[in-house]
Image (tube, helix red, strand yellow):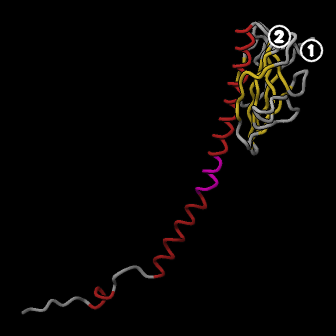
Amino acid sequence: MRRISIPHSAARQRGVNLVEILAVLLIVSLLAGVAWPAGQGMINQAELRSATNTAFNALLYTRHEAARLRQTAYLCFIPSTSQPTCQSQSTGTLGVFVEKSGEADRLVQAFDLSAQARLHFVGIQHPYKIHFGELGQRERLTEQNGTAYLNVELASAQRHVEVCYNGRIRIREQLTQSECQG
């Protein structure tokens, strides 16, 4: 019977050694260290877009309800649906209210926001709510009727939801110049 001889070095190697494992771990950790910040930035941008879209939808819904019911409707920050009272600072929920003469304003819809996003109204009479009239137009602000918008911030990025007097609502990356016309 013939014996097959296996080289000595091939017979000894049955797995990986410690140096090879450490080299693979080093490469994986370097790749993770480079990919993590980029991934985190994408997550922040997605959350910012989500919060902006929620604010945009809440404003559209408020305008729609005012026009549909032919009554004044407004949007403001509320602590929760079980506590439907307007707050002066950003909370995790936006509430849509309809004003009825002789009755308490009633909450008709709530919109949950991203927990990390900070929102605030800019350019409106009430520092924490925006009104739409019975024809869907935004409340008048001043004699010049300036621009109103909802500012949405997350981390160091921000977006704006501009609300024109005629009720037009637009999402803006930057507010360099208003698209609202007098």
Label disc, if present, on residue 142 of the rendered structure: 1
Pick the quarter of the image with the N terminus.
bottom left
- Mark closer to the chain start, 2 or 1: 1
**Badge 1 amino acid:** Thr
Q: Which residue is mark 2?
A: 182
Where does residue 105 sit, x and y in percent of width and height? 83, 18
Residue at image location 83% in from the left, 21% down from the top: 130
| Left or right side of 17 for 79 | right
Residue at image location 15% in from the left, 89% down from the top: 4
| Left or right side of 156 for 27 | left
Above or below — where is 43 with respect to 132? below
**Membership of 111 in magenta stretch:** no
Magenta stretch? 35-42
Residue 178 visible? no
Question: Residue farthest to the left?
Answer: 1
Determine whether the residue tagged by mark 2 lies in a helix, strand or loop.
Answer: loop
Where does residue 134 sit, x and y in percent of width and height? 78, 8
**Membership of 38 in magenta stretch:** yes
Q: Dot 2: within a 10 Å radius of its alpha carbon, few (fewer than 14), some, or many (20 or more) residues? A: few
Above or below — where is 62 with respect to 22? above
Where does residue 119 sit, x and y in percent of width and height? 79, 34
Where does residue 61 sit, x and y in percent of width and height? 69, 19
Question: Residue farthest to the right?
Answer: 143
Above or below — where is 138 with respect to 94? above
Determine the image quadrant of residue 104. Answer: top right
Residue at image location 66% in from the left, 40% down from the top: 47
